[in-house]
Image (cartoon, rainbow, N blue to C red):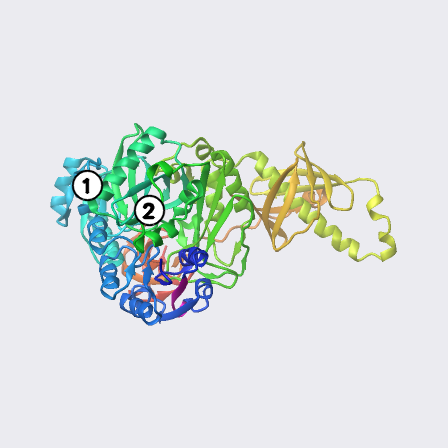
Amino acid sequence: MFNKILIANRGEIAIRIIRTCRRLNIKTVAVYSDIDARSLHVREADEAVHIGPSPSPSSYLMYDKIIRAATDQGCQAIHPGYGFLSENSKFAAAVVEAGLVFIGPSSEVIAALGDKISAKNIAVKAGVPVVPGHNQPVGDLEEIKELAAKIGYPVLLKPAAGGGGRGMRRVAAPEELESALQSAQDETRKAFGDDRIFLERFVSNPRHIEIQIIADQHGKVVSLGERECSIQRRYQKVIEEAPSLAVDADLRARMGDMACALAREAGYSNAGTVEFIMDDQRNFFFMEMNTRLQVEHPVTEMVTSLDLVELQLRVASGEPLPLSQEDVTIKGWSIEARICAEDSGRNFLPSTGLLTRYSNLKGKNIRLDSGVEAGSFVSVYYDSLLSKVISWGETREEARTTLINALNRYHVEGVTTNLNFANSILNHPAFVKGELSTGFIDEYYEDGEARIDPPMEQLETMVLATTVVYHNRKNLVRESLKPMAAKVGLSHRPAQVHRYVVKGNKDIFEVELRGQLSYQDWSVLINGREYAVVAPVFEFYRRRLKLSINGVNQYFRLQYRQNFIWTAFCGISRIFEIYTPREWELAQYMPKVKKDAQANVLLTPLPGMVVSVLVKKGDRVYRGQDLVVIESMKMECGVSSPCDGVVEKVSATIGKAVETDEVLITFTI
C-alpha cells in the first residue's frame, strides 16, 4: 500500500479521497490554484502545493506541474478524482513515465474506452448490445444529413471524446442539423480538444442505468450493482439512486455480466462504470464507459458497505481484489442529490459568489460529501457542484423521506443553488412512484418549477411554521418592553387565541393560534384544518427551524425579507405576507403597484466570458432568440432576447469578461 499520494483535483472529491487515505494512514498532498488557496481541500490535506493561476488550463490541467509536485513531495501515486485529468490518457502515461502509479486504468485502456467510437467497437466484440447508429466520426453536413435520414429522427450527435454530456445535441429535424453540429463541435473542442462527432439513434425517454465495476491487475472483475441516474438536465445528473426499481435480480445479473465482459475485453483494471440506456421494454444498450470514479459512487457505497476509494488504492498498489462476485450484497436503498451553484428558475445558469452561511449536515443514515464551508468562494472557473447529500434506508421510501428531511435543514446562502429544485423532484408524485426517464425534468418541470401545484398540506405546514415564527418574534419583542413584574406568572395565563391572514403567491390562509404564551405548545387551525405543534426549545437558529407537527419532526429554512418571510420546505419556496385580520382588511383598499415596463436592454444573467456575439447593430431580433453566448463554469450559455426589436447598440465583445446584470445589447422597441 502507498505511504503518500497526490490528489490531482479539488473540492468535494479531493476531500472524499483524503477521508479514506486518513483512515488508511496514507499521507495526502493537495494541489491548488490562486483562487483555491484558502479552500477546504487545501486545509484537509497533509500538504499542499500551488500549481498556477485560477483558470483550470493554467492549473488543474497542467499535468507537468502536477507530476512535478508529486515527485518533489515524495509521493508514490496520483489519484485523479473525476473531471479535469481523470480520463486523460496522456496524463496517465506521463504519470507512469515519471515513476509514479496512476490510480486508475492504464493509459491505453483510457484512450480506447474514452473514445466513444472505439468503446462501442469493444462493446460489440464483448457481445454487449449497442444503440443503432453510425459508429464513425462525421464532419460533412451533407453526409450527416444522409446518415440521419437512414437512422431516423430524432438523432443524437455525440462527441467521440469526453463525457458528462458535453457536446451532446438532440436533433429532431434536418433543418436543426447545421446549427446543432456547429455548437456540438465548438463545445467538445473546448472541453476535450477533439471535435469528432458521431451519430446514434435517439432513444426517447429511456432510463439511464449504470453498472459499477471494480477490477484488479490479476484478471478479476466484479460488478457492484446498478445505479439509476435517469433524473438529468442537459445530460447532467441531478438525482441518483441504488438500486433501480426497473432492475430485478435476473436483469441485474445480466447487466453486471455484460459490464464485466466489456471490462475484460478492454483489459480494464481499477474502478469504472459501464453506462446503459434502457427502453420501456427493458431492452438495454451500451452507451459509454467512464474510466474513473463517478460523482454518484456514494450510493453504491451505501448499499454495499464498500469503500470504492480504498478498493481503488488497493488495486493500484497491486493487491488482488479482496472480494468475489458472491461477496457482493445489496442492502437497503440509497439516494443522492447533487447540490450545485445554479439557478433552476433561470434555465440552470451558474451562480457565483461568497458563501455567507453554511450548515454541515449530521444525522442517522445521512452522508454529506462537501467541498465548501462558510466563506468559500464559488467562482466561474470550475464546475458548479458544491456538495452531495446522500441518504440510506431499509426501503426506497425510507431513503427518500430521509433525504427530504436532510435537504429541508441543509442551509446554503450567498449563491443561488438547486437545493429546492432537487428536493422538489424527491417530492414529485412521479418520482415517488418510480416513473423515471431521462426526460423526467422536461416532462414535469418548466422554468425550474413543477407543472403541478404543490400539495395543500405542505403549503399549510409552511404557513404554520411561518406564522409561529412571526408571532413569537412579535410577542417576544412586546414582552421585552414590559416591566419585569408584569411577566411574573406569564406561563400560567389561560390559553389565548391569535388570528392572522397569511398570503403566499395567490393563496390565502386564515390562521388561528391557540396556546400558552410560553411559545412551545400550540393548537393551530389553518383554513379549518387542525394541527398540533410542539417546539420543545423554541429557537429560530441560523434561519433554520425544527417543529414537531402532529407528532412528526419537520424542518424549515426561513429568512426575514423586509416585512415578509421567505420559507422553504420539501422543495417549495414561498414569500409569505402576514397580517392581522384588521391589517388584511385595510390592505384590500391599498392601491396596487404596477409592474415596470419591460426594459429595452439585454442583461447578462451570469458572470463569465463572451465567446460569441450573434447579431450586429441594425439587426431585427425576436423574443427568445439567442443573441450572445457566454462561457461560465465550463458551460456555454446562450443569452436570449427579452423582446422583439431592432439592435441599437452592441456592448458585448468577444473575449470580454462580464458580470451579472451587465448590459450586453440595447434595443429600439
- The residue tagged 2 is 321
Write the residue at 82% across / 56% down: 482
Q: Which label sits on residue 174?
A: 1
Residue 640 visible (yes or no): no
Write the residue at 38% across / 38% down: 328
Q: Residues within 10 Å of mark 2 (few under 14, many from 20)?
A: many
Where 303 falls versus 71 (above or below)? above
Residue 462 position within the rendered picture, expressed as x and y whole percent measured from the top left: 60, 42
**Which three-letter amino acid code belongs to the residue tagged 1?**
Pro
Write the residue at 67% across / 48% down: 469
Count of marks overlaid on the render: 2
| Whole-number angstrom distance, CA of label 1 to CA of label 2 | 50 Å
The image quadrant that residue 447 belongs to is top left
What's the magenta bit mostly, secondary-structure-wise?
strand
Looking at this view, is 629 or 106 the one in front?
106
Asked which secondary structure carries label 2, the reply is: loop
